[in-house]
Amino acid sequence: MHIPDEASPAAAHTPGAHRPRVALAMGAGLIDDLLPPKVRARLEEVAELLTAEVLEDFTTPRAAGVLARTEVLLTGWGCPRIGAAVLERAPRLRAVVHAAGTVKTFLDPDVLARGVAVSSAAAVNAVPVAEYTLAAIVFGAKRVFPLSRLGAHGRRTRTDADLATLPWLGCAGLRVGVVGASRTGRRVVELLTSVLEADVLLYDPYVGPSEAAALGVTPVDLDTLMAASDVVTVHAPETPETRGLLDRHRLGLLRPGALLVNTARGSLVDTEALTEHLVSGRIDAVLDVTDPQPLPADHPLWELPNVFLSPHLAGAQGNEVARLGQSAVEEVARLAAGLPLRHPVLAEELGRIA
């Protein structure tokens, strides 16, 4: 993905403008991938980096000295929890810019309530997740995962008899049910309609008819989506309301041969019920997340030919991580220029976003 050039009035550094004082808070092993030389140089152009070392613990004397001068915390995976105690140590803090997806794992709602601006790179992290999802749907629709196992039985090719055992095969005319119009869900919709020309059904209680029309999807209730889709792909956030959203009843609505793709959170799907459907061979699944995660070593899903498990890697990995750092740095540049954040996290949305 190409990150749009934000070196415009929205992100350019004006000579003489205030360069906010920035501290880095995340796991130390992340920093080189997140801020490679070009991205770090951009950060040092628009801000004053208080220390090159990351803060992994806010309770140390060194952290106290840094926090006392910090105006912006640039955070990443492994950031310590930010709550009232940290706010007391950081009286000048005016923004938390997160170079990853969800902020809910480390940020107390008090931070937003006290007027600290918060930004997230969730929209950028959605890109590789959506790409993974599209690949999973293509491979799943082509039955790559079970048919690839023919090699394990001494055969390199498939026969018409192999294909005859499948309820359907291929990507043409797919009807895909998208559960959740999150940032990732919306990106998946774009790819499905533009690349696969799929018929997309959407379940999201927060999306009205006019917005659904703009997205090019058909809004339906969840039971209808489950029963009518060839593929169901999950992109809803993990909240008390969504835990077990795809329960035994709804999984039972899936048509024989349907494909379930989950790159969101394992807790959204009833693992016991899903396992029964997969062991029976009635449906297929591509699961980047599970509940529990990882599954026990003796769990039957590890060995099933109609299941593909990956270790929670759909989000930014390797050379993709720098995109998150670049997005975060450009948010800092906007703050330096006195402009609103491009990707704000709003207090009123915190309870229903990932």
Image (cartoon, rainbow, N blue to C red):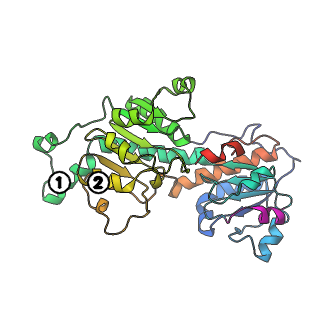
In-front residue for pair 327/161: 161
Q: Residue at x 83, y 52 (%)?
A: 19
Q: Is residue 150 above or below residue 51?
A: above
Residue interval drawn in magenta: 80-90
Q: Quadrant of residue 172?
A: top left
Of mark 1 and mark 2, the one earlier in the sequence is 1
Q: Amino acid at mark 2?
A: Glu
Q: Amino acid at mark 1?
A: Leu
Image quarter of residue 58: bottom right
Q: Residues within 10 Å of mark 1 (few under 14, many from 20)?
A: some
Residue 132 % position (x, y)? 43, 47
Q: Is residue 265 visible?
A: yes
Q: Report x, y in % for residue 35.
A: 64, 58
Q: Which residue is mark 2?
A: 276
Label 2 sits on a secondary structure element that is helix
Tell me if 297 is positioned left or right of 321 in this view. left
Left or right of 204 on screen, residue 73: right
Residue, far bottom: 61
From the top left corner, tell me how far across and down residue 337 is, in percent: 81, 43
Q: Is residue 309 visible?
A: no
The tag on residue 150 is: 1
